[in-house]
Amino acid sequence: MIIVGLILCPISIAVVIQLNKFSIKKSIKIGLQIYLWLSSLLYVISCFIFKIEPFNFEILSAGDYFISFAVIFVFSPCLWVLLYYYCQKIFKGMRVRKNARIRSNEEYIYYRDNLDKIPPSIVMFTSIMETDIKKSVAAVILKLKLNGYIQEMNHQLQYTHKDDSQLLESEKLVLKSVQYQNLNEKLYKELVEKEALHDKYVKKNNKGKVFKLLKIFITLIMPIIFIGLSMQFDEYVFAHYKTYIYDSMRYVSVQDGQIGDIHYDNIDNIDDYYHGYVEIDNQKRIFYDKALIRADKFDNEFVLMTAFFQILDAICLVGSIMMSFVMVFMAIEQVMYFNKNYIRTIKGVEFLNKAYALKNFLNEFSLMKERTEEELILWEYYLIYAIVLDVNVKIKDDIIEKYYMFS
């Protein structure tokens, strides 16, 4: 089984590499994730079934299941890959990476197409949790111009009357401001915040300090409670669903039975029970313990319940440990956002990391810092995000001066 695990390892690594590509289709991504889970689950089950060294375990309780799984994990690099992938997802989902990078042309296209669906005003709000009116409006006007809602004639911006039903309310407000040369800045800020909340890039965090402290306390105390309940459940299962091993065979204690002769009770199959042979008055007699039935006799209701509760117990023990790590991450996040009115969602963090990757891509593009807006006509789309992400100060100031016409 160790050799099988080693063979599965490079396959699992290749799958994770594919999953980390941003351009991968959702259906393929789900299929690859299902493969990771199924291959890992089948591998663990196979280790228990075949009982090959060092996986030859004597399982008596849920604690033994837990220890056995830990041993299987240590000797199985393919399971490390699964753990790495999901820990990476959790960590990325909670951490903004300002040093995010676009690693290939494929990602470059993906970032372009995905960010194009999101107004620059929301990019800014998700980034700094506030709206810089000049930057935001100038970027939105440039985007509306590129999409044909506004045209520039004689150095003046004009409304084209193009169907604006696909635009967000904040974008419509900017469009009207171009038409009527007037902008309600307060309303614009409110609309941007509302849209960021509606699209679930951020969520409100404006509860009182007492409530926030209580939330942090509950977050930290929950795994402790869960671990305590799991340990109590483990003691209950161990006391009421006892398992023994005799002659390399697992037996479940069905009831408080007595050792008796085979002819005193009618038993369908003596191999189902723990039994042996003794000589009484020079006669070989069979004895059995009617309290100990084989653990693989799943047609017996009590044996089935024992297997269910022992597996459930093992899952609770593993889950309580995993829950502890997740709750610590959540508590750290709550402390970081304690004095802020908004907090980024996982969706918001993932989206913002893409925006920062684009920002770093533009920063590293050597010509980007040297050229003017006219020379970068092919990059006009990226200038939208150069404004709100502060990529190039000169370009940002030139475009704001050109497109922000409100006092």
Image (cartoon, grey):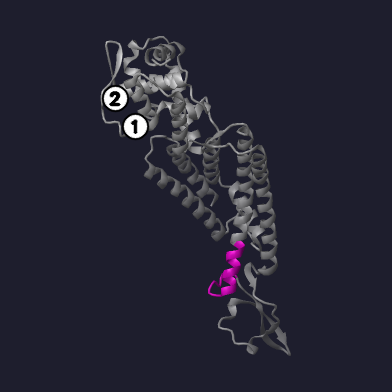
Dot 2 lies on which element?
A: loop
Q: Is residue 221 magenta?
A: no
Q: Quadrant of residue 383?
A: top left
Q: Is residue 252 above or below residue 86?
A: below
Question: Which label was assigned to residue 167?
Answer: 1
- Residue assigned mark 2: 149
Whether residue 64 can be seen here:
yes
Q: Is residue 301 magenta?
A: yes
Query: What's the magenta bit mostly, secondary-structure-wise?
Result: helix
Q: Quadrant of the C terminus?
A: top left
As drawn, is 295 to the left or to the right of 385? right
The three-letter code of the residue at mark 1 reads Leu
Q: Which residues are magenta?
A: 295-310
Q: Is residue 21 above or below residue 146?
A: below
The three-letter code of the residue at mark 2 reads Tyr
Horizontal and vertical percent position of residue 11: 45, 43
Q: Is residue 404 above or below residue 327?
A: above
Q: Quadrant of residue 334?
A: top right
Front residue of 318 and 346: 346
As drawn, is 86 to the left or to the right of 277? left
As drawn, is 72 to the left or to the right of 121? right
**Quick check: marks 2 and 1 in contact, CB under 8 Å?**
yes
Horizontal and vertical percent position of residue 92: 53, 35
